[in-house]
Amino acid sequence: MIDTDIHLKGHKMRALVAGAGGFIGGHLVKSLLDDGYEVLGVDIKPIEDWHQVHDNSLNIYNTDLRSIYYCNEVTKNIDECYNLACDMGGMGFIENNKAQCMISVLINTHLLISGTTNGVSKHFFSSSACVYAADKQIKDGYDVSPLKESDAYPAMPEDGYGWEKLFSERMCRHFTEDFNLDTRVARFHNVYGPYGTWTGGREKAPAAICRKVIEAKKNGTNEIEIWGDGNQARTFTYITDCIYGIRQLMKLEKNNPIEPINIGSSELVTINDLVSIVEEIAGITLDRNYILDAPKGVPGRSSNNNLIKEKLGWEPSVSLKQGMEETYKWIEQEYDRNTL
């Protein structure tokens, strides 16, 4: 049994962060701690593999939240639950591990059930732009139409991972309707930044491209491998914008109707553009080797930010160049530390 009583002293707000050992979870924990929350961080990864562990005020547990038993334990005496826990990665992982990605549905289902039983006040679920209907994402380059939240229906999300996220969104909606649990859902658009996965097969495009450029520069190969033809279009969201959006979404009044909301930059680029940005940061120009049969995702995906501007009076604003400079610098430090 997990001893959850250790984080109940005093009158601080008590937050559970599921997936605290991951990239976004680690940054969210820091934000909550900085605001005076008492945080219970949970992740299936061994603690030595967590992306960030901040200080002794964070209570951390290594356990599997696909089990309702452990969800019941960690949601006791919690004010706010932030569910960022799932089995996921970049396109190479998602396209080749559909069943594994879908099993994450157990985490959100069990956290909702146990949160309702244990009196959790607010439940946040981290969804994804992968929920959007495929026929809304068939154009590439700059012909992409920004996706508004209603474009998830009629439903035809990305197979595996996208279906799990969309189903979990509906679970949140119905727990609000049936049990009055205050749920909030954000659809993340390609979140990146320091302290993220940058190697091993689960990294996303910004980190993968940074690593490939660093390798080419340091090894003198003068070549970069790009999955697809490079015309796939995306918006990428810097981690500080993502965390701010989560925190502001959770501060909305309960009587403010809450539907899934995009947290994504509106700065649209192609993968070729992203490579050019990283080349400029690195001070190098590389030959491009296009792998046309590699996993590359939908042709185009962009975030329509009308709803988030309406609800929060804000939208993500960190430029891709600024965010990639910080990301490149951190990955280069990690690369040097791991190769020396």
Image: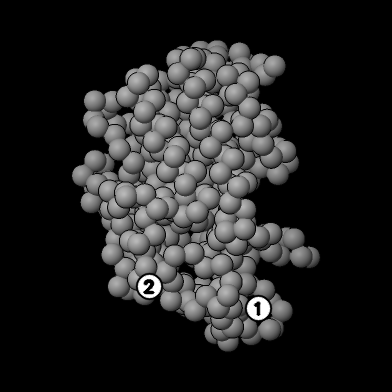
User: How far apart are the two marked residues, 2 and 1, measured between alpha carbons?
Assistant: 27 Å
Q: Which residue is mark 1?
A: 216
For residue 116, side relative to residue 180 (left or right): right
**Residue at 63% of width from left, 23% of height from top?**
70
* Quadrant location of the C terminus in the rendered image: bottom right
Residue 262 appears left or right of 61? left
- In primary-sequence order, the first of circles 2 and 1 is 2
Between 169 and 160, the residue placed more toward the observer is 160
Left or right: residue 228 compared with residue 238: right
Is residue 166 left or right of 296 when viewed as pictured?
left
On the question of residue 187 being in view, the answer is yes
* Rendering coords of residue 301 (x, y %): 38, 62
Q: Quadrant of the rendered structure where residue 216 is?
A: bottom right
Which residue is depicted at the point 55% across and 78% down? 292
Q: What residue did someone put label 2 on?
A: 140
**Residue at coordinates 56% horizontally, 44% vertically from top-left?**
102
Residue 91 in the image, given as x and y percentages of width and height: 55, 61
Which percent across, then down, holds residue 123?
A: 43, 28
In the structure shown, which secondary structural element does the residue marked by tag 1 occupy? helix
Between 255 and 180, the residue placed more toward the observer is 180
Identity, as a three-letter code, of the amino acid under mark 1? Ala
Query: Crowding near pointer 1: few (<14 within 10 Å), some, many (20+)?
Result: some
- Please state the horizontal and vertical placement of residue 135, each as a whole percent of the image: 35, 62
Query: Which of the 4 image quarters holds residue 238?
Result: bottom left
Task: In the rendered view, tell whether residue 333 sits above or below residue 97.
Answer: below
The residue at the point 38 percent across, 22 percent down is 181
Q: Amino acid at mark 2?
A: Asp
The front one of 224 and 109 is 109
Furthest-right residue in this view: 340
